[in-house]
Image (cartoon, helix red, strand yellow):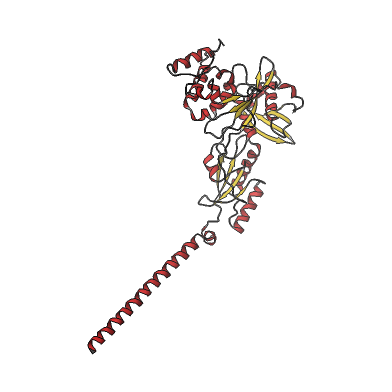
Amino acid sequence: MDASLFDMKGCLRDMHRTRIWRWRIALTAFLLLLAAGGFMLFRTSPLAEQETVDTQVSSIAIFALKGCGGCSKALGVMEQMEAISPDYRYQYFSISEDTEAVNRYGITKHPTILFLNAQEEELGRLTEDISSDGILRELEDIAANGTRPPKGTILSAIPSTMPSVTLHAYDPHSGLFTPVSQYVQTDTSVRYPKVSAMTMLTQLSDLLPPELESAIPAGVNFVEIRTEHGVTVVELSPSFRAFTGSEEGERAEEAIALTLQTFEGVNVVQVVSGAYRSDILYAEALAGRSDGKTDYLLHPDTPLPHMSSVREYNAAILHARHLAFMPCFCGCGDAGHSSNLNCYYAQEEDGRLTPTTHAKFCQTCLDVTNMYLDGRQQGLSLKEIRQSVDRAYQGIEPTDTPMPMNE
């Protein structure tokens, strides 16, 4: 009996010890989890980030746009900085070409200066007062106060719609200029419509329909646009000097001025090339030089959603009258289309073009347009191109499209 009682007491003691050890193990596990959670919380806290971020400026980067006068000045400042402070690494990015970097750093303006650490992380930026003194002041501020991120959240995103510009081509039959709309291909949120307009104007020659001509002489290129004392100055390549003082040169200057004067706030334009400076071109004096036609203009109230290529959409603006004689074979006749033109635009009563996204998603539509463009490049007549298209899609039901007369 006494032995049994003794055994029972021993058993109770063992159970008590086991229970105590279980509680100790549970408490230890809880404390370990609590410590781990606190460590993770600290790692993700602003304080932890502040302690781990490298705030030492290692490189200075500039994002500049070719053809922009302000960007040219900023590039000159960067060259000065390389001489003044050679210990930094200097990086040069193109707004129009280095789109991955533009979007990664959220660049929205040109020019922009970034201050980066060794991990290529941004410590600060300048979009104004881009001078050697301004850059040195920013470097001092970052050294004294640490990272200086941009105010607010800057995100550079591909725009939801395609921007467009209005150029001016020459109509040799009337001796006047015809306004033509063209979409600007862009893959960032940075806007540079005037630079785009001048670049596209000098490259318009091979894109125009036969009834229009480029006003810019062959071999003449756009160099830069800038503002001098309230005058919008356009610099052309030295090759333009061969045309200065001639009717052809005067025509080019008028087309440039008319194109720029479609932008709000631009009234006074001057064209330069080397030492040559044209007369000042006022909007009032050029008012009668545009024929005011709307056949090649986009309807302003209907934007085109963003797409990776607008080549065919731009061609359809310029060649709308001719694509109206090109059938389509994708079955869009059931949707009311009467030609390949309708795959891109509906033509309003005033002649303006309202875009549709149909061609964006239809390779057949794009192929027919490119067959037309290739035929034009080969010197074929409109009727010959139409016959070639019909043969290529023989056996497939086309839209109800009229046959063109010989052109």
Residue at the right extreme, as displayed: 284
> Which percent across, then down, holds residue 396?
44, 19
Residue drawn at point x = 38 percent, y = 71 percent: 26
Residue at the top extreme, as displayed: 406
**Front residue of 265 and 233:** 265
> Which percent across, then down, holds residue 5?
26, 87
Q: Quadrant of residue 65?
A: top right
> Which percent across, then down, holds residue 371?
49, 20
**Front residue of 311 and 97:** 311
| Residue 125 as seen in the image, left or right of residue 176 | left
Residue at the bottom extreme, as displayed: 2
Residue 6, above or below 200 = below
Would residue 275 be visible to someone looking at this image? no
Q: Quadrant of residue 35?
A: bottom left
**Front residue of 380 and 127:** 380
Q: Quadrant of the N terminus?
A: bottom left
Would residue 325 be visible to someone looking at this image? yes
Q: Quadrant of residue 13?
A: bottom left
Residue 380, above or below 272 = above
What is the tally of numbered marks visible in this picture? 0
